[in-house]
Image (tube, helix red, strand yellow):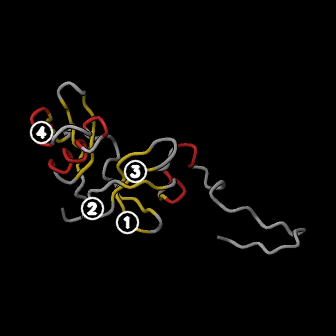
Amino acid sequence: MADGFIAKRWLISVAGYGSGVEIAATRGQALAKTWRCDAFGNMPFKRFLSIANAVIDRDPPARWGDRITVCGEPAFFTSSNRAYVEFVRPSCGNVRHAHPYDVLPIEYRPEAYRDTAAAQPPAPNPDHKGTYIRV
């Protein structure tokens, strides 16, 4: 793609094991990531392929693939929960996780991390004899 967003949501179903979602650039990568799950630890890949199926999710969640900034660098939003934000970098299909305060705009952070005042370091105490270092 021209903008660098190559990740896709794959709906994976494995006969006798259930179904789930995997994020990867290709169908083969999605199946391989699923096979690496502990549930299939002793199963040969050829056997796994005979009982697994992967199709593209044609109805991804809202904001899937939106442009965001993570640690000052461009990224694409994939999802979030109460603890972190999932994203992919341009031209990369690997999902990464970021602390919500590293993500802009703040609308892509989990609800508990949207208070911009909480994201600021504490003000130095003038009565403190040490030196305040902003990290």
Circles 2 and 3 in contact, beta carbons < 8 Å:
no
Where is residue 59 shown, x and y percent of the image? 23, 38
For the point 43% across and 45% down, the residue is 80
| Residue closest to the eye, 2 or 124 | 124
Badge 1 is on which residue?
Answer: 74
Q: Secondary structure at mark 1?
A: strand
Report the amino acid beneath label 4: Leu
Where is residue 92 shown, x and y percent of the image? 27, 61
Comes first in the chain, label 3 or label 4: 4
Assess disc 4: are there few (<14), some (14-19) or many (≥20) residues with their C-alpha within 10 Å of its C-alpha: some
Q: Secondary structure at mark 2?
A: loop
Report the amino acid beneath label 1: Pro
Comes first in the chain, label 2 or label 3: 3
Circles 3 and 4 in contact, beta carbons < 8 Å:
no
Badge 2 is on which residue?
Answer: 92
Circles 2 and 1 in contact, beta carbons < 8 Å:
no
Question: Closer to us: mark 3 or mark 4?
Answer: 4
Q: Is 133 located above or below residue 66 in the figure? A: below
Assess disc 2: are there few (<14), some (14-19) or many (≥20) residues with their C-alpha within 10 Å of its C-alpha: some
Badge 4 is on which residue?
Answer: 49
Image mark for residue 86: 3
Question: Closer to us: mark 3 or mark 1?
Answer: 3
For the point 24% across and 51% down, the residue is 24
Q: Residue furthest top?
A: 16
Circles 1 and 4 in contact, beta carbons < 8 Å:
no
Q: Is 51 located above or below residue 23 in the figure? A: above
Tell me how far mark 3 sits from mark 1, CA to CA: 13 Å
Where is residue 75 shown, x and y percent of the image? 36, 61
